[in-house]
Each structure stands twice: as C-alpha cells, then as structure tokens.
Amino acid sequence: MVLLDGKKTSNEIKEELAVEVAKIKADGGKIPHLAAIIVGSNGASITYVNAKVKACEKVGFGSSLIQMPVETTQEELLAKINELNNDMVVDGFIVQLPLPDHIDEETVLNAVSPNKDVDGFHPANFGKVALGLPSFIPATPNGILELLKRYKVETEGKHCVVVGRSNIVGLPMSILMGQKKYPGNCTVTLTHSRTKNLTEIIKTAEILIVALGRPEFITGDMVKDGVTVIDVGITRVADETKKSGFRLLGDVHFESVAPKSDFITPVPGGVGPMTIASLMQNTLKAIDMNR
Ligand code: GUN
C-alpha cells in the first residue's frame, strides 16, 4: 500500500511555483494576485479561505481577502465581483461556497469573468474542460489528477468508479478520467444517490473516487484488492479530545480499506492540501489568460 501524500505533494508544487514567481520577479513581470470573497462566517469556509491566502504568501503571490457580512445582498456581491473583474491587479479570484440562502449561486458564478475564474466554476470553463480544451480545471479534480500523475498511478483501461455527482468534484472528475490522456483513458462509471447496486459497482472499481460527504461510508468489504482509492470527503465530527472540538473524517473507512489498496489518500493530508496547490497553479495560469 502506497499513501498518496497530498501534504508532501502540495508542498512540492508550492515550491515549484515559488521558483516560477522568483523568475517572474527577476524578469520584471506581473506577480500573480489571487482575491477571495467570503460572505458570512461559516467556520469551515473561513478555515479554507485563510489556508488559500496563506498559500499565496508561501509561493510569493499577492492576495486579497474580501469578507462580506452574511446579510450582504446579491446585488452588493455582484457589484464586488464586477469590481474584481475589472481590477488590473487581480489575476484570479474565487467566491467561497456555500453562499447564504438568499443569494443565487448560479447567478454569482456566472458573473465571474471566465478569464479570472480560477475555481473553474463558470459554465464556459466547465464546457472547455469537458471538451478537453485548455481551461481552468476545478481545484479538487485537478489536485486528484496531479496526485495520480506524480505517483505514476496507472489509469489506462482501468475501471474508474466515481461516487457523487457534484458540479465541483464528481461530475468533472468523471469526465476527466474518461478523456484520452494521462491520467485518464479509464472506463468510467458515475454513481450517485439513485444508483442501484452501488456496492456491487464499487466492488468492480480499480480506481475509486469518493466525494459523497458521508463519513466512513466505504468499508473494506466493499472494495477489491489492488484498488486505488481517492477520498474527497472531509466531514467535521465532534471530538472533545481535540482542542478544536472536532476531527476530520473522510468518506472512506481508512483502517479497513487501506490494507486492500495499492494506493490510497489519507484524510486529512490527502486531497485537501492538493486543492489549494491547484488553485495556486490556476492563479499562475490566469496571468496568461488575462494578457
Ligand atoms: N467550497 C468548497 N470547495 C470549494 C472550492 O473549491 N471553491 C470555492 N470557491 N468554494 C468551495
């Protein structure tokens, strides 16, 4: 069993990006700048956004954190997005999800300029990704591809089962793993809450990507020997023994699944840190998109 170490790999990527930034600086070029908008005070969202800003500092990017109160109107948020779309300093920006209920997510994501949409959530960018054209690949799918690549996991001709069909992870992941390139070239099954015989399908997976949000849903008896397991789940469960009052659980019961796996991501320290590294990669890419 090989652990797909997202923490180590994301640090390597950030070091590579820091070298790129140093080159840009030496050449007198534009230093990449990421802005993040957060509306409200969701604890997990604040943690994620702070981690993104910290990563910018580490690689030498500029960053702005725009915190808006929970009662912000949709119009006010759209005005802020418009401002960032036209701000020459900002190369890419994200609107942290989820948004408060009174704000329509689709309207907001559509308002972000596709050239600055480093999350890859705009329909134009999703369409390009689906067609295999150059675009911003969303951070989580891109982080997973990067892990598979850097650990040289064989994917060609394999049966990849994706569990969960979210726009952010499951759906793009299922498309990417079927594309004619590496990592990819898989035969893909996209499963979801209405899938019949889910456990039988999971048992046939050679590559299993789980993005369900149900802690420890996948157990050792559900997978076949030699599987590669990518656990996207990250759920906070109460734990009084921790200083934070919670611990993080993946969608995979690691203790029973790991012994049957060839490769497996831990939680935490697997996919999570990779998403941040991917966002940094996309921000560097945004420099070219805007020139
Ligand atoms: N919420 C959970 N994941 C993400 C992400 O990748 N980007 C944004 N903007 N919000 C999220």
Image (tube, rainbow, N blue to C red):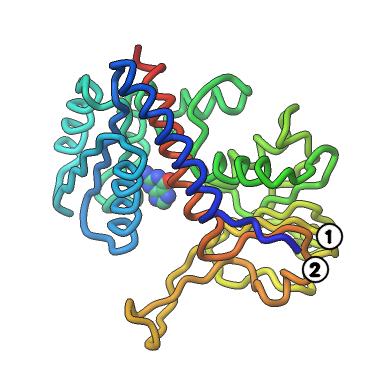
- Could you tell me how far apart the alpha carbons at marks 1 and 2 are, in whole angstroms? 6 Å
Closer to the camera, 90 or 18? 18
Q: Residue at x 40, y 17 (%)?
A: 289
- Residue 115: x and y in percent read 38, 21
The residue shown at (59%, 48%) is 165
Q: Farthest residue toward the front?
A: 26
Within 10 Å of the Cα at label 2, are there few (<14), some (14-19), or many (20+) other Cα atoms? some
Contact between labelled residues 2 and 1, with CB atoms less than 8 Å apart: yes
Residue lying furthest bottom: 241
Residue beneath disc 1: 226
**Mark 1: which secondary structure?**
loop
Kindly identify the amino acid type of the residue bearing the numbered disc 2: Lys
Instruction: State whether residue 66 is above or below residue 29.
Output: below
User: Which quadrant of the rendered structure holds the C terminus?
Assistant: top left
- Residue highlighted by disc 2: 260
In the displayed structure, 244 sits above or below 126; it is below
The local secondary structure at tag 2 comes to helix
Q: Amino acid at mark 1?
A: Gly
Is residue 157 left or right of 10 when viewed as pictured?
Answer: right
Q: Earlier in the sequence, mark 1 or mark 2?
A: 1
Question: Circle 1: is it few (<14), some (14-19), or many (20+) Cα within 10 Å?
Answer: some
Task: Locate residue 103, reporting x and y percent.
Answer: 26, 45
